[in-house]
Amino acid sequence: MSTADISAAGTSTAGVSTPAAEASAAGASAAGTEVLGQAAASARTAGRSGGVAAFARLLGSELGLTFRRPRNLVMLALLALVPVLIGVVVRTFGSDGDAGGIVAATAGNGLMLTFVSLYVLVPLLMPVAVAVVGGDAIAGEANAGTLRYLLTAPAGRTRLLAVKYLNAVVFSLALTVTVAATALITGLALFPVGDVTLLSGTTVTMAEGLLRTLLIVGYVTAGMAALAAVAMALSTLTEIPIGAVAGTVVLIVVTQVLRAIPQLDWLAPYLLPTRWTGFDAVLRDPVATSDLGQGLLAFCAYTVLFGSLAWARFTSKDITS
Amino acid sequence: MTVGHDAGAPSGAPAAIRTRGLTKVFKGGQVAVDALDLDVPRGSVFGFLGPNGSGKTTTIRMLLGLVTPTAGDHALLDRPLAEALPSVGAVVEGPAFYPYLSGEANLLRYDAANPASSARDARSRVGQALERVGLSAAAGKRYRAYSLGMRQRLAIAAALLRPRELLVLDEPTNGLDPQGTREVRALVREIARDGTTVFVSSHLLAEVEQMCTHAAVMSHGRLVAQGTISSLHGGRPALLRVETPRAAEAARILDGLGLAEVTAAGSHVTAELGGHAPEEINAALVRQGVPVRGLAVVRPSLEEVFVGLTGEGFDVDG
Ligand SMILES: Nc1ncnc2c1ncn2[C@@H]1O[C@H](COP(=O)(O)OP(=O)(O)OP(=O)(O)O)[C@@H](O)[C@H]1O
Ligand SMILES: [Mg+2]
């Protein structure tokens, strides 16, 4: 038995000749399928049927971590406070001055507060919250050392990345819904309820106004999800979560600055922040679907590009933390 | 990447771990593991020895798919890695958990990551794993508040979440108190009795000697020896040591009996035992009137074997 022999340094282990090893390496794939034991084969079948349930379980675990983490809850609560603040300010000061435009519109209809709040939060504050969750996704686990245990569990690298991304998308949705919901409730409580006057001057019913708000929530979530893909890609590059988060925030700020430079007008349509606020297309009559479509296309492109980068990096990376 | 069952190889028993030419060169040219040919038979308790920096953890990371080898093949349980891993429990380079979760919640988290685990019996399996490592009382405590030894125990519990075919334990007794160390040794024996192969890295030689059936020794990323514990000892002869006030006379008798390397010093005599039976030597000494105060067979400890193989130096393997 080869295992009973002692192999001295420099000499090959008696009983295991190099040709044998080479032969086995050469026929690795063929032999690999042959030696699958009964257990492995049945595990594979079970894996296929139970795969969805197992994926859902891991996603559930991930969502549980995300939505029980105090840091994330504080971010949600703070952002939910902003619409309330705006509502109170407009209610207090907006009606007695000769405030025009958007403020007057807000004071005139409860539904407009949702639109205004998102317009205020979408350029920076909401993206920062998404960057925190997305940037932490892989780097946070690597930093804590939990990544090596998740992967040996074995979570599977592609599977784990998919779960992490879906988790960030759900967080983006929760964030948008939270902001929209508190804005809606505040708006309905503080301002008149009735037909909504759109940006193009036409008036629609309250019901249609609500429907359009839903459309906005979907669009903003898609925009945040695209940012989550960027944050996630950065998250696979480092073992320091703060680095990935800060990197994403810096990218957001830099693109916002680039947008503001008139000479770079040609670049603006390709930048995420330009598209984020494109949801005002929903408030035109008829809805400017081509603008919305282009925005969604841009979100898709960012998600696919940065998702692929994250995948390529994460599936080939040495986990040494 | 994986090695199949080489039908022609004389090793009859199926392998729990098998590597061929496994090599890892880190960025910057650091050769952490150099052409490793490891054969861990199923059912063995296999000690993986080596000084600090000799490449033990890097080897384990490659075996578990965390680090991609620069060259070579490896297989766990003769299966593709993704199919083997659900049956492998591992502790790699110390415990790592979510500090804000309880011990129990942490184990549920890792269990959720295993696609072969079902949610239905997760709680009971977690409870059993905690009980096996003596952590039941601290199950609801936050990991942040765990002591070093409790953390180490939790890491072992995570490796025991399911019935395993192979346990890979990287220095599992690190940071444990003497009771904890004894308990881990007993646990390893118990697990091995159930037929699970245990691959345990350590630099505590006495520990390996007490708990393992096989061992391999690493030095500077290379394998310098592997085999059963007795075959590792086998490289060095057992010594007979006789305590007597009449050492010179005893030496003459041992010489006469054909023992090699007989040396008398003060009030004792040593010689290589060879194939002789110690009780017969004792009888011969007494028959010829040599008062025997003590007689012992001294086998070289694994520590001596280890130092012989890896050198006396204290410096880490860089
Ligand atoms: N990520 C890395 N990048 C570069 N070199 C590394 C890396 N990880 C380990 N090494 C080097 O590889 C060698 C082997 O390290 P390894 O951690 O495998 O040793 P070990 O045998 O586990 O040591 P110990 O007993 O101290 O745990 C060391 O020289 C180490 O410096
Ligand atoms: Mg180590």
Image (tube, coloured by chain):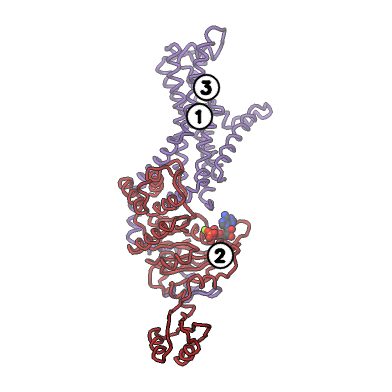
Chain colours: A purple, B red
Give me the C-alpha separation between circle 1 and circle 3: 13 Å
- For label 1, the residue is A293
Q: Are marks 2 and 3 on the same chain?
A: no
- Left or right position of B63 against A36: right
Residue at the image point whose x is 52% and y is 8% from the top: A95
Residue A109, horizontal then vertical, whole percent: 46, 13
For discs 2 and 3, the disc positioned in front in the rendered view: 2
Query: Tag 1: residue type?
Result: Gly
Give the quadrant of residue A257.
top right
Real-space Cα separation, disc 2 to disc 3, in angstroms? 62 Å
Secondary structure beneath label 2:
loop
Amino acid type assigned to the residue bearing label 3 in the image: Asp
Q: Is residue A286 in sight in this rendering?
A: no
Residue topped by disc 2: B221
Vertical side of A216 occupied by B201: above or below: below
Residue indicated by mark 3: A280
Front of the two marks 1 and 3: 3
The x, y position of residue A77, in whole percent, is 47, 27
> Residue at the spot x=54%, y=11% of the render?
A93
> In the rendering, at what x and y percent does residue B90 appear?
43, 56
On the question of residue A239 being in view, the answer is yes
Report, in whole angstroms, how far the alpha carbon at label 2 lies from the one at label 1. 57 Å
Residue B20, position as x, y percentages in the image: 49, 67
Point out which mark residue A125 bears. Answer: none
- Counting other residues with Cα less than 10 Å from the Cα at mark 1, is it few (<14), some (14-19), or many (20 or more)? few
